[in-house]
Image (cartoon, rainbow, N blue to C red):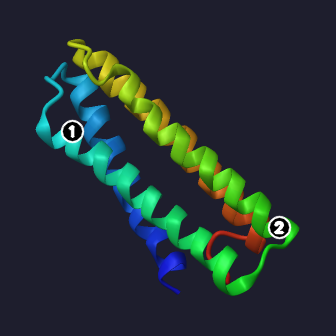
């Protein structure tokens, strides 16, 4: 149950980060500690959910074709989220805001595809 509920925290973290990064990009703000924290929080929640899902697949529910497809797609979403480290040391705030927004959108799209393919919908269990 926890694995299924954390997706809402991932969605909330993504929404907050996208709003903050859009604001920072539009107003040409400096990329700061709060922004790093939001990206780290999003990535951390995604990682946590990935680990919980892998525990479910391996330990409790078993490996079926749909579950393996779901796990691989979620792994790709986590890899996408971690790609933000590529511009971590950049001094260009606009680049960080823009690239992190792209990363979050790609990761969220992968999560949505993974959930819909597994369950047949985002909300229904």
| Residue at position x 47%, y 41% in the image | 81
How far is mark 1 from mark 2, CA to CA?
A: 35 Å
Label placed on residue 86: none
Q: Nearer the viewer, residue 79 or 34?
A: 79
Q: Is residue 125 above or below residue 120?
A: below
Camera-side mark, 1 or 2: 2
Which element is circle 1 on?
helix
Q: Which mark is residue 66?
A: 2
Single out the residue that lies furthest toward the right.
Answer: 65
Badge 2, how many Cα within 10 Å: few under 14, some, many 20+? Answer: few
Q: What residue is shown with label 1?
A: 35
Q: Position of residue 108 (x, y in %)?
A: 54, 49
Depicted 104 relative to depicted 60: above or below: above
Residue at the spot x=67%, y=84% of the render? 125
Q: Residue at x 21, y 46 (%)?
A: 37
User: Residue at 24% of width from left, 12% of height from top?
Assistant: 92
């Amino acid at each position: 149950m926890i694995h299924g509920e954390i997706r809402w925290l991932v969605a909330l973290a993504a929404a907050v980060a996208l709003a903050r990064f859009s604001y920072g990009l539009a107003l040409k703000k400096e990329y700061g500690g709060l922004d790093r924290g939001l990206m780290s929080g999003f990535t951390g929640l995604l990682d946590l959910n990935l680990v919980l899902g892998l525990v479910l697949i391996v330990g409790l529910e078993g490996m079926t074709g749909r579950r393996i497809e779901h796990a691989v797609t979620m792994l790709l979403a986590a890899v996408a989220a971690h790609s933000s480290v590529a511009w971590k040391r950049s001094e260009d705030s606009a680049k960080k805001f823009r690239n992190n927004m792209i990363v979050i959108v790609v990761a969220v799209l992968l999560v949505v595809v993974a959930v819909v393919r597994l369950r047949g919908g985002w909300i229904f269990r």
